[in-house]
Structure formats: C-alpha cells, structure tokens
C-alpha cells in the first residue's frame, strides 16, 4: 500500500491565545509573529510545501481573520489552505475534532502545533506510523532541564507507555508538537473543549501510541526568551524549512 506525503493532509493548530508572548507580540496572533522578516507560520507552510504536502487545514480561533487575511488560499506557497474556525476556544483536541469534516475520507493525517518548528522528514514519520499500526505517532526530541515540557516514556521498540506532566525532571524525551493520526483518533476525542496533550494522549496509550525521535533543530516560540532565540536561529530555521527529504514513503 502507498503512503505518500503528497496524498497526506496536514492540520495546523493556530487558534491559541498566545498569552505568554503578548509582552513582545501584543496584537498579532502568535503564529504570525515575525521570525526575521516573515511570519513564523510561513516556516511551517514552506516546510510542508518543500516536502510535497500541499493540502493544509488551519484550525483558527483567536484573531482568525488576521491569519486568513495573511495566508489566504495559500497559492503563493503552492499549497491549498482550508480553514476550520472555532467560535469559542476548544483546545487542541476540540479544534481538531471540529475540523473532522475537512478530513473526510482520509485514512491518516499530520497535525502540527502552529507555534513550534521541528526539522523532520514527514515521509519517514508517516511510514513509521503505518508500520506500527497504532492510532497516533508523536515526534519527540530529547531535551535537558526543560521544566516547561512534560516528558514522554517510550520503550526500546518505540511504544509510548506514559506521559509525565511538566516538572523539574532532569531531561528526557518531550513532545515536539508534530503527530500522525489515524482517522480513528476522532473516536477518542470527546465533544467540547479538550486538550490533546492532557486529556486525549493518556487515554490513547492502550490503543497504540508510538514515538519517533528526532535529532534536528527544534524551536517553540511560546515564551519571550524562546521567541528571541528564534530570531537568532532564523537562517537555520529557514534552511531547514526549505530542505527536501528523500525518504521512500512506499510500504
């Protein structure tokens, strides 16, 4: 069976309030905060487009009109963008469930947080997801002394066995904010506001959650310090975003 990036839709979660970043980005949706002279969200779109993934769904909420005005149809990046706008804050899980009608008929799809960037081969993680047979595959990265992230417990074979909330742990694998989901994920997301990370993932473990460790550059612009670091890494981030991957995605 073929699992090509080109046939895979990508969902970008861009509806958050971005409260921690308002001291430096006061009136702009966090995903549109500038990195260099371009919006951060452009990094994600260019990364997807460079790897042949051109069917995107943006889950919007806070200042949704500004995101739609900036990105429009996506034609300037050779992608097609559809929008799923939440009337009230639904959390990451609720926003994804609301977008289900735009994912009708697909067997799997990629989901990305709109405020973080990870250097990744999408074809490779899609292939791993189908080989594992689980409901979800998470991109993870090893971090040291990162109190703002929860850690992910993973077996030698890559199966996720647990999640630890944010704590003073000394380091380990953390959620990098990129997922591949089988369509069955919608059976595990309740109606209303819900968090993928806090509410859905822990309940999914028995149904098969796997981790794909990544080694490349990673940045989350959720805090002023990390937003400043993104400016320093700007050239490296765009280089990674434009990089084409050559993994074979045929199983």
Image (cartoon, rainbow, N blue to C red):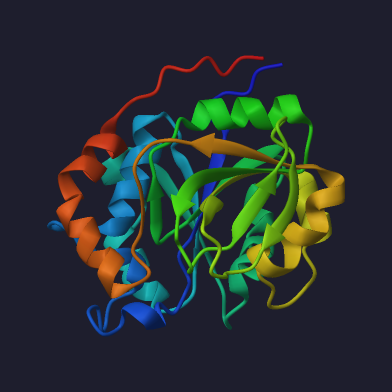
In depth, the one of 250 and 131 nearer the eye is 131
- Compared to 51, does 37 lie above or below? below
Q: Is residue 32 left or right of residue 209?
A: left
Task: Name the quarter where the N terminus is drawn.
Answer: top right
Q: Residue at x 49, y 75 (%)?
A: 61
- Compared to 47, does 150 lie above or below? below
Judged from this view, the residue extending furthest toward the front is 170
Residue 107 screen position, x and y as percent: 72, 37
Q: Is residue 14 left or right of residue 68?
A: right
Q: Is any part of residue 15 visible from this angle? A: yes
Residue 16 screen position, x and y as percent: 47, 74
Q: Quadrant of residue 62?
A: bottom left
Q: Quadrant of residue 189?
A: bottom right
Residue 234 screen position, x and y as percent: 18, 50
Q: Residue at x 74, y 62 (%)?
A: 200
Task: Name the quarter where the C terminus is drawn.
Answer: top right
Q: Residue at x 80, y 69 (%)?
A: 190
């Amino acid at each position: 069976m073929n699992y090509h990036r080109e046939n895979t839709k990508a969902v970008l979660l861009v509806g958050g309030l971005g409260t921690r970043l308002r001291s430096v980005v006061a009136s702009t949706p966090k995903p549109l905060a500038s990195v260099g002279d371009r919006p951060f969200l452009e990094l994600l779109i260019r990364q997807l487009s460079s790897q042949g993934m051109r069917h995107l769904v943006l889950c919007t909420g806070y200042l949704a009109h500004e995101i739609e005005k900036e990105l429009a149809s996506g034609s300037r990046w050779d992608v097609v963008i559809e929008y799923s706008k939440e009337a009230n804050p639904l959390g990451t899980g609720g926003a994804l469930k609301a977008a289900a009608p735009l994912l009708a008929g697909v067997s799997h799809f990629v989901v990305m947080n709109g405020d973080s960037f990870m250097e990744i081969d999408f074809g490779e993680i899609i292939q791993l997801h189908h080989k594992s047979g689980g409901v979800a595959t998470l991109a993870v990265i090893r971090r040291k002394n990162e109190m703002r992230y929860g850690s992910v417990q993973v077996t030698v074979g890559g199966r996720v066995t647990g999640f630890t909330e944010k704590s003073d742990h000394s380091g380990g694998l953390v959620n990098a904010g990129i997922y591949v989901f089988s369509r069955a994920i919608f059976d595990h997301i309740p109606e209303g506001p819900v968090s993928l990370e806090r509410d859905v993932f822990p309940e999914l473990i028995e149904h098969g959650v796997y981790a794909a460790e990544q080694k490349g550059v990673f940045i989350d612009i959720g805090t002023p310090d990390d937003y400043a670091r993104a400016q320093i890494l700007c050239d490296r981030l765009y280089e990674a975003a434009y990089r084409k991957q050559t993994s074979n995605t045929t199983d």
